[in-house]
Image: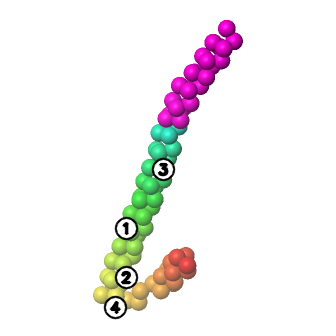
Amino acid sequence: MKKFLTIVAIAAAVVAVPLAMAQNAGQGQSTAQQGDQAEAKAQSEADAKAKRRAAATAEMKAKGQQAPQQEEEEEAKKKR
């Protein structure tokens, strides 16, 4: 009887471990995808901000006004 209980316990472990690992693997993958999506969103927002600034600077130069150098210097410091 003791051997039978041991075999049943081992069989249950053999079945339970892969099931638990499969469930956890799906969760880890979704967090990695969420991280990628957040990074892509941040990059697109930064690109849009850079385009807006470039357009504003070009417009100011076209009107003969001086471009805001202080903001450009602050951005350059942040990038370093």
42, above or below 15, in the image: below
Q: Residue at x 53, y 25 (%)?
A: 15
Tell me the residue that label 3 is attached to. 32
Q: How far apart are labels 1 and 4 at the CA level?
A: 24 Å
Circle 1 crowding by C-alpha within 10 Å: few under 14, some 14–19, many from 20: few
Query: Residue 11: image x %, image y %?
Result: 57, 21
Q: Quadrant of residue 53?
A: bottom left
Q: At numbered mark 2, what does the secondary structure look like: helix, strand or loop?
A: helix
Tell me the residue that label 1 is attached to. 48
Circle 2 crowding by C-alpha within 10 Å: few under 14, some 14–19, many from 20: some
Give the mark, 2 or 1, whose residue is nearer the N terminus: 1
Give the mark, 2 or 3, whose residue is nearer the N terminus: 3
Question: Is residue 18 rendered magenta in the image?
Answer: yes
Q: Residue at x 55, y 76 (%)?
A: 78
Q: Residue at x 50, y 34 (%)?
A: 23
Give the mark, 1 or 4, whose residue is nearer the N terminus: 1
The answer to whether one can see residue 74 in this image is no
Q: Which mark is residue 13?
A: none
Say left or right for 77 vs 39: right
Tell me the residue that label 2 is attached to. 57
Query: Residue 20: image x %, image y %?
Result: 54, 31
Tell me the residue that label 4 is attached to. 64
Kindly check if marks 2 and 1 are in contact, taking CB atoms under 8 A apart as contact.
no
